[in-house]
Image: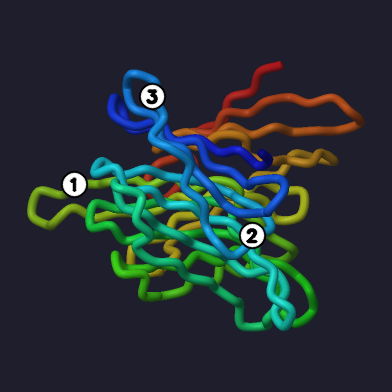
């Protein structure tokens, strides 16, 4: 096994997903609350990497990875299985420039819409953050290209659910990544509109996000083999404060 990823829906399912070393097949194993495994499910054709796995409350499994194509290089691969381990759909995404596209994180909303974020190279080979949305049947709904001044790549995606008294529930996706040596956080809604992004730089240091919740982002700042940690608190559309510890 390699590239193992994990997700859990308490208390019913614990899922381990990865790639089989000998065949390069994506696979997952689903454990119940008693620790019993329900078998190993494989996906053909061979894949290059696996990036993330999610399980929804119904027990459906969502996996993303990268697949290599001779004409378009690395492309996003998204696959979904139902709770009985039947393949529901699979989809590949190739960016506009047909360069390398590498997915990083996946989120699923209450309507089983799937959001995948990753990086996509332009014609000059510079990567930008790209997020795509699929409906519950695997149809591509939209793509969103978050271009920055410099090569950018996401690491983490966290959904946030905001409830208004006179409006239906509105969902946003917060994406943490980097642009060159700077940390980045961005907010997109479920219609593909990115309404806010902010970069955080530390002088002469490489800054990378390490964790993301609905209100906090952790950053690691590295220079000459040593590092310090930052904790960033953010609101719906702005950074509220930054704390540092060694």
The residue that label 2 is drawn on is 47
Residue pointed to by mark 3 = 36
Q: Which residue is mark 1?
A: 163
Look at the numbered disc 1 and give the secondary structure of its residue.
loop
Which x, y percent locates residue 16?
50, 36
Spatial separation of the CA atoms under disc 3 and disc 2: 27 Å
| 11 horizontally vs 43: left or right | left
The residue lying at 91 percent from left, 31 percent from top is: 224
Q: What secondary structure is found at the residue carrying circle 3? A: loop
The residue positioned farthest toward the left in the image shown: 166
User: Is 194 situated above or below 4?
Assistant: below
Q: Is residue 22 visible?
A: yes
82 left or right, relative to 178: left
Rendered position, 54 above or below 114: above
Mark 3 to mark 1 CA distance (whole Å)? 38 Å
| Residue 240 appears in the figure | no
């Amino acid at each position: 096994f390699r590239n193992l990823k994990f997700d859990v829906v308490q208390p019913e399912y614990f899922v381990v997903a990865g790639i089989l070393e000998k065949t390069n097949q994506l696979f997952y194993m689903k454990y119940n609350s008693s620790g019993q495994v329900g078998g190993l499910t494989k996906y053909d054709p061979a894949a290059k990497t696996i990036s993330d796995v999610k399980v929804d409350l119904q027990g459906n499994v969502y996996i993303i990875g990268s697949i290599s194509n001779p004409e378009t290089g690395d492309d996003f691969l998204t696959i979904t299985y139902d709770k009985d381990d039947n393949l529901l759909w699979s989809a590949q995404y190739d960016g506009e420039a047909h360069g390398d596209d590498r997915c990083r994180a996946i989120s699923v909303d209450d309507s089983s819409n799937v959001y995948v974020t990753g990086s996509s190279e332009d014609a000059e080979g510079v990567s930008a953050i790209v997020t795509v949305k699929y409906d519950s049947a695997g149809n591509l709904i939209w793509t969103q290209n978050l271009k920055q001044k410099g090569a950018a790549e996401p690491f983490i995606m966290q959904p946030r659910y905001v409830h208004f008294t006179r409006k239906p529930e509105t969902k946003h996706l917060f994406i943490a990544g980097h642009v060159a040596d700077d940390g980045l956080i961005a907010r997109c809604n479920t219609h593909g509109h990115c309404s806010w992004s902010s970069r955080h730089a530390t002088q002469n240091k490489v800054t990378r996000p390490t964790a993301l919740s609905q209100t906090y982002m952790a950053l690691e700042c590295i220079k000459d083999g040593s590092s310090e940690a930052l904790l960033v608190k953010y609101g719906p559309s702005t950074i509220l404060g930054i704390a540092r510890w060694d």
